[in-house]
Image (spheres, rainbow, N blue to C red):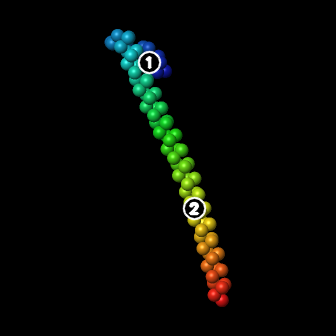
Amino acid sequence: MSSASTIESREFRSPQRKLVRFFQKSRDNWKRKCQAAKQRCKLLANQVRAVEKSREQWRAEAEAARRRVEELEQMLAAQKR
């Protein structure tokens, strides 16, 4: 049995005008909550991408600096010999 037929077969005691307002308000609140969660999710995903990009840039800079230090240490050791 589908949920639509379950709702149709149920008799409500409240006037239909009140039920309509209640269900519309409920739907609007649900939509608002869903949209806020979706926006927050998108914001966090963008933030994660930005942090990963920044971290990768720092990692590349640190690796380049480490290679440069090793190169200079080798040059210094060669000069000392």
Circle 1 sits on which residue? 6
Q: What is the three-letter code of the residue carrying label 1?
A: Thr
Q: Residue at x 50, y 41 (%)?
A: 43
Q: Residues within 10 Å of mark 2 (few under 14, many from 20)?
A: few
Q: Residue furthest left?
A: 13
Is residue 49 shown left or right of residue 74? left
Q: What is the three-letter code of the residue carrying label 2?
A: Arg
Circle 2 sits on which residue? 59
Q: Is residue 22 above or below residue 79?
A: above
Place of residue 53 in the rendered image (x, y in percent of width and height, measured from the top left): 57, 53
Q: Residue at x 59, y 63 (%)?
A: 61
Residue 67, which numbered label? none
Q: Residue at x 47, y 16 (%)?
A: 5
Foreground: 65 or 34? Answer: 65
Label 2 SS:
helix
Asked if residue 10 can be seen in this view, the reply is no
Asked if residue 81 can be seen in this view, the reply is yes
Foreground: 32 or 12? Answer: 32
Label 1 SS:
helix
Quarter-of-image position of residue 18: top left
